[in-house]
Amino acid sequence: MKPLIFALVLTCCAAAPAPAQTLTPPEIDAAIEAGRTGKEKPLVLTCEAVVGFRELFRTEKSGHNPLGSFAITIALSTGRIALMSAEAARLYKPFAASQVPAELKTMAAFLAAEPRAPETGATPGSYIVPSLIEQIVIRTWPKRDRFVVPAELVTAPVEWPNVGGAPLQVNRARARFALGEIRELTLGDLEAVVVTQAGERTCAIRGGDRKRVFGR
């Protein structure tokens, strides 16, 4: 199922954070060119948010088992612009700086979580399905003692009309983080955490990928 594109709107905070960096026209043009020429991948991190080790051995029951995973895409504003440009190029459509959404003209970090389609389980009559997303955070790993929450979290419904004879309604989500807060986390690996009604689904952000995407 192809992700829907939905906008993020920043909310004002009680404690005024450091102002976000405004992208310059050359930076926007460079991001557009990266996408147009197929060079957007270095600007983007992808991973799979999955259930914890213990849950893998949970006995499946007949019906819906909320153990499904999520495809994670992480990028800065420049990476998001490059992805939009790449999608436009794929469809042979033009994409100019005037088409860049206002929220992407200041530097921030974005994390999109897309639910994987339901699958048939190992037990007869069972189906592995995603659970509803309630929150997304980025935290340190392996200590997991520090984390950042998004400045804004937007969800959109996803529905499969017939999964084992019953409809399934879940959601996708996109979170916007203040880049400075992520950079201030303890150096090393990080973890993307999708908090669902059935528990956490996580994927690793290795130190090298962290530096490549977030710059620190």
Image (spheres, rainbow, N blue to C red):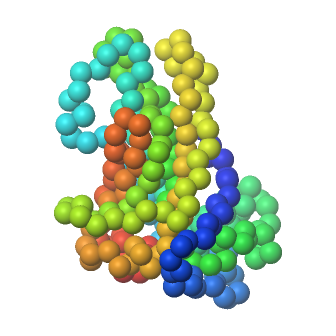
Q: Is residue 70 visible?
A: yes
Q: How many marks?
A: 0
x and y percent of residue 11 in the render?
Answer: 61, 66
Vertical placement of residue 138 versus 181, above or below = above
Quadrant in which residue 172 is drawn: top right
In the foreground, 22 or 116: 22
* Quadrant that contains the N terminus: top right
* Quadrant that contains the C terminus: bottom left
Quadrant in which residue 199 is drawn: top left
Locate residue 112 relative to residue 189 in the image: left or right: right
Residue at 20% in and 61% down: 142
Residue at 49% in and 50% down: 113
x and y percent of residue 137 in the render?
Answer: 40, 58
Vertical placement of residue 46 versus 199, above or below = below
Residue at 55% in and 71% down: 13
Residue at 24% in and 61% down: 144
Vertical placement of residue 157 versus 43, above or below = above
Quadrant in which residue 190 is drawn: bottom left
Vertical placement of residue 55 versus 75, above or below = above
Locate residue 126 relative to residue 89 in the image: left or right: left
Q: Is residue 35 visible?
A: no
Locate residue 118 relative to residue 56 in the image: left or right: right
x and y percent of residue 178 in the render?
Answer: 49, 73
x and y percent of residue 166 in the render?
Answer: 54, 15
In the foreground, 54 or 19: 19
